[in-house]
Amino acid sequence: MARCLLFESCDRCLGEWVEESPTVQKRFPPPPSCTLTFQQVLRTHRTHSSSSISASWLPLDHSKDTMAVIRNEIFSCFVFYGVLLVIKMYIIAVITGQVRLRKKAFANPEDALRHGGLQYHRDDPYVERCRRAHWNDLENIIPFLFLGAIYSMTGPSLTVARLHFVVFFLGRVVHTIAYLFALQAPTRSLAYTVAQIPCVSMAVQILMAVTTYA
Ligand SMILES: N[C@@H](CCC(=O)N[C@@H](CS)C(=O)NCC(=O)O)C(=O)O
């Protein structure tokens, strides 16, 4: 019996890593679906309420474990920027609602009636601007959420992946600011184009990663 380098003991019971051995294998045979070819270990746990032992088969492959951690870091980085962008979209929605109230321009007659009369069931140029900013986010951030999630699984380097996510994030923030504050052209278009670059790059890399399966 030997401790694995990756040993983590459970804080409630004494989890043990047990090297593959004929005796242990006999007691806890690998599941029929087990196709692992590298060295295997059994992770045994004494169940808390009784002295019986439960066990599961796990691969002992340190390089693969390291890869999993790296992939997880990349995915976490993606999630961080993805969620910030979703929050940014929520903020545009809140701004749109506030502008509707301030300008008395309601999309629905019942809202107009509640706020003064049917004459306020009308369009407003700035409300429309907010809506276009929001719509443009939908057109671009939703594809990013799809591409970024898949791209994170293709094993890019963390630095390169972060660069993709940060460039997209900053591009979209500048796009929103340029749209809502009607900044001088071509600020908004430039921000849009800059944000598209990492998306195109991710799409190409994903296609290259899966092209053998086409
Ligand atoms: N659906 C967009 C497609 C192209 C696009 O997203 N262009 C950027 C840069 S010019 C933009 O901000 N378009 C304004 C918008 O979608 O409201 C459009 O109609 O313009």
Image (spheres, rainbow, N blue to C red):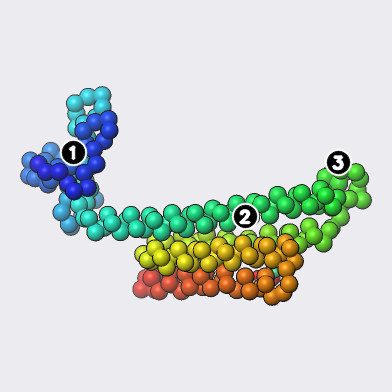
Per the image, the residue denoted by label 3 is 114
Q: Is residue 110 above or below residue 155?
A: above
- The structure residue drawn at horizontal position 55% and vertical position 62%, both measured from the top left corner, is 169
Q: Is residue 5 above or below residue 202?
A: above
User: Which quadrant contains ligand 1?
Assistant: bottom right
Residue type for callout 3: Arg
Q: Is residue 48 above or below residue 31?
A: above
Considering the image in quadrants, where does the N terminus appear? top left
Residue type for callout 2: Lys
Circle 2 sits in a helix, a strand or a loop, which is it?
Answer: helix
Marker disc for residue 16: 1
- The structure residue drawn at horizontal position 57% and vertical position 72%, both measured from the top left corner, is 194
**How many residues crowd mark 2 within 10 Å: few (<14), some (14–19), many (20+)?**
some
Question: How far is mark 3 from mark 2, CA to CA?
Answer: 29 Å
Question: How far is mark 3 from mark 1, CA to CA?
Answer: 66 Å
State which quadrant residue 135 falls in: bottom right
Q: Give the number of the mark in front: 3 or 1.
A: 1
Marker disc for residue 88: 2
Mark yes or no: residue 35 visible: no
Question: How far is mark 1 from mark 2, CA to CA?
Answer: 46 Å
- The structure residue drawn at horizontal position 43% and vertical position 65%, both measured from the top left corner, is 161
Q: Residue 123: x and y, percent? A: 84, 58
Choose the circle earlier in sequence order: 3 or 1. 1
Q: Residue 132: x and y, percent? A: 72, 63
